[in-house]
Image: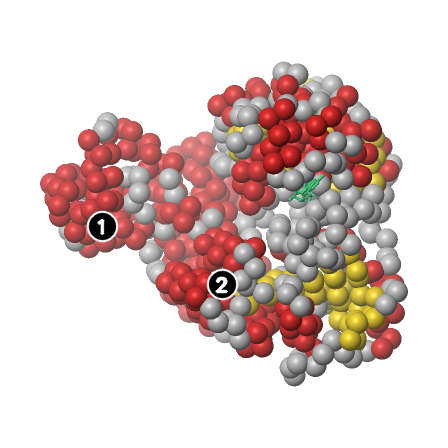
Amino acid sequence: MEIADLPVPPDLADGYIDRGIRELYPPQAACVEAGLFSGKNLLIAIPTASGKTLVAEMGMHHQVGRGGKCLYIVPLRALASEKFEEFSGKGLRVGIATGDFDRRDEYLGRNDIIVATSEKVDSLLRNRTPWLSEISLLVVDEAHLIDDPSRGATLEMVIAKLRHKNPDMQIIALSATIGNPADLAGWLDAELVESEWRPVDLREGVFFEECIRFSDSTRQVERRSKYEDLDLVLDTVAEGGQCLVFVSSRKNAEAFAKRAASGLKLANPVLAGYADKLRSNAATDMGKTLAACVAQGAAFHHAGLSREERQIVEAGFREGQIKAIASTPTLAAGLNLPARRVIVRDYLRFNAGEGMVPIPVREYRQMAGRAGRPRLDPYGEAVLIAKSEEMVDELFDCYIEAPAEDVRSRCADEAVLCTHILSLIATNFARERGEVLGFMDGTFYAHQGESPRALSRAVDRVLEFLRESEMITEVGEWLEATEYGSLVSRLYIDPRSAEVIVTAMTGQKDYTDIGLLHLLCSTPDMPTLYVRRNDMYVLDRFLADHRDDLWMEIPWDAGEGFDRSLKTALLLSDWADEVGEDVICERYSVGPGDVYGMVESVAWLVHASRQLAGLFAPHLKAPIEEMELRTKHGIKKELLPLIRIRGIGRVRARRLFNNGIDSIEALREAGPEKVGKVLGQGIAAQVFEQLDGVRDEIANAGEEQSTLSRFG
Ligand code: ADP
């Protein structure tokens, strides 16, 4: 099927043809035949890199051509930016929504395509954003993530709510290969397009004792080093390919990158250039190790890296200079970096409470799917490593030849039901118990036919919690959200978190930074740090001196949960006290990317707690508002006036302050020349341009920007 014959705008078709895309891949042609352009719902379950995004893009242009509006849901923020860039500049207005959760973002409705995370769409629904009812095409990327234990239920509810709102909307769901695609397609009333076709051949095999066994052939791997896994890398590189190596932990990723660097020993000016850039940005030992590895042609990649570090590593790999990346499996979903050979070195992973468990088949497929760069590699190879002869067959059975797991609904979990049922009531989707159950009937959970009685019992327990915490009231049959309940729903926090926060705040006379941070780190919405044995000394010492500053009682059976919350609160308190990033990373054994993640999560909770204080503890509102800016930017109170200026973050504000410039007035007094000496002439000019403007505008701009953007 030729691109030129399809009902898509000529400019889009010409753009594809210029990129060498003239003909549809077979699964893409199957999508057209299944009704892509005639409004049919589709579930496209085909391997990675076989052209799903392109199908969705054509569908969106076709819809917009008929006056429609499209919403493209992605699971991760990083993917939202990637898709936003991919869809932009092709004749349509494209918007992206990933930011604050309590906004309606009405301006976004001006776009033809809106790319958003599922959480953001959920929050837009809760805030009753009007343009959502104009959506005529919904694209759900990575639809198999409905099965994700922590976020799957939100995705499922968002799809159910949007369908409820817009019954005629077309749905295109993109999915990895799954065990029960017909089930998911049935729920979505979708035509199923399923295929194993790939643009580059994939050979899957198991390595044991210098030999990779594929299902129909073998390949000898020359001994070039002391390590088998390294031999596998060197073997590919000797033939002009690159490798992605998936390992089970960050530590292993770093260790393997070091090993690969000393095995590869590459050296050239381009690599030296990357290494210099990494070294000059490196705030931590991890950054320095990364620079040293990259100088020799290897790298590691995990969530602890800062945004700059990730970008340099990814660019270096795409340009073919970095030959091997060792990565944690969590990145398999987001990492769009094909390589000739993918080595799945560790197929066991540590799960809290379970110990080492084998990774799911779907995850293996996602990693293996990265093998082979279309048009660049003659084939792709995915290789598992066996530790014994018997394991060779086992790995074939458990991964290479195993069917992918079924996708199951996660809606039965009460914790997630609680937040979603509150939002159904607060947004008038459901006004009585029967309507709540009726709505739940349209979910994948109900479609899968899992015990309706269990669901109705869970719904009753949730309604009871919401009534008892006074988030909803019941008049006769009629359910209504209280002011408190509506606020919690709009703020997009777990109702259980809201209860923890409100209970502690109402009993609290005096404000303390650590009291607030520790409280927020004790809510289910906050990810917390792992506590090592030698952290205990620091925690105990802190408690000996500051026990009274905490807002929550220390439970007599305080266990790991308490320690984790306290350690995380101490990190955040250091951040707000301007402790250097390098010191924080060292002190808490984290990477800059982790600091970013935690600051981002807590900043939202501080914001939410300020709003809750407005209702329940007005005396705490002003200090919490200050803390909101302090956590966002990582600054002490004395820098608050300066941070309001665009382009001034924690480092520049501190430099100004240390030079005696501590306010907007002081800036004006100092003048461009003196400020130029402190910040450089370029920045000083920007600052004074703003000072010439209206004062209120400066204040607003200060709210918008965040020091976080440096990390994200
Ligand atoms: P997926 O979303 O399934 O991972 P993409 O749509 O991102 O895959 O496609 C992967 C790559 O293949 C992209 O670089 C894309 O431009 C290219 N591609 C997609 N369809 C075709 C086609 N019909 N012919 C040639 N290249 C294509």
Res 162 quadrant in image: top right
Along the viewing direction, whichever of 435 and 285 lies nearer the viewer:
285
Q: Tell me if I can see residue 135 in this picture.
A: no
* Amino acid type, callout 2: Val
**Element marked by disc 2:** loop
Q: Which mark is residue 679?
A: 1
Disc 1 element: helix
Q: Nearer the viewer, mark 1 or mark 2?
A: 1
Residue 396 visible, this angle: yes
Q: Pointer 1 and pointer 2: residues touching (CB < 8 Å)?
A: no
Question: Does 67 appear above or below 532?
Answer: above
Q: Is residue 299 above or below residue 428?
A: below
Badge 1, how many Cα within 10 Å: few under 14, some, many 20+?
some
Location of residue 349 by image quarter: bottom right
Is the N terminus in the top left, top right, bottom left or bottom right quadrant?
A: top right
Residue 400 is left or right of residue 497, and the answer is right
Instruction: Give 528 or 369, whichever is nearer the viewer.
Output: 369
Q: Residue at x 55, y 36 (%)?
A: 84
On the rendering, which quadrant does ligand 1 occupy? Answer: top right
Above or below 667: residue 515: below
**Mark carried by residue 590:** 2
Residue found at x 12% / y 42%: 671
Q: Amino acid at mark 1?
A: Leu
Question: N-terminal of the two: label 1 or label 2?
Answer: 2
Position of residue 648 measured from the top left corner of the image (x, y, whole percent): 29, 45
Name the quadrant containing residue 287. bottom left
Label 2 lies in ligand 1 vicinity (Cβ under 8 Å) = no
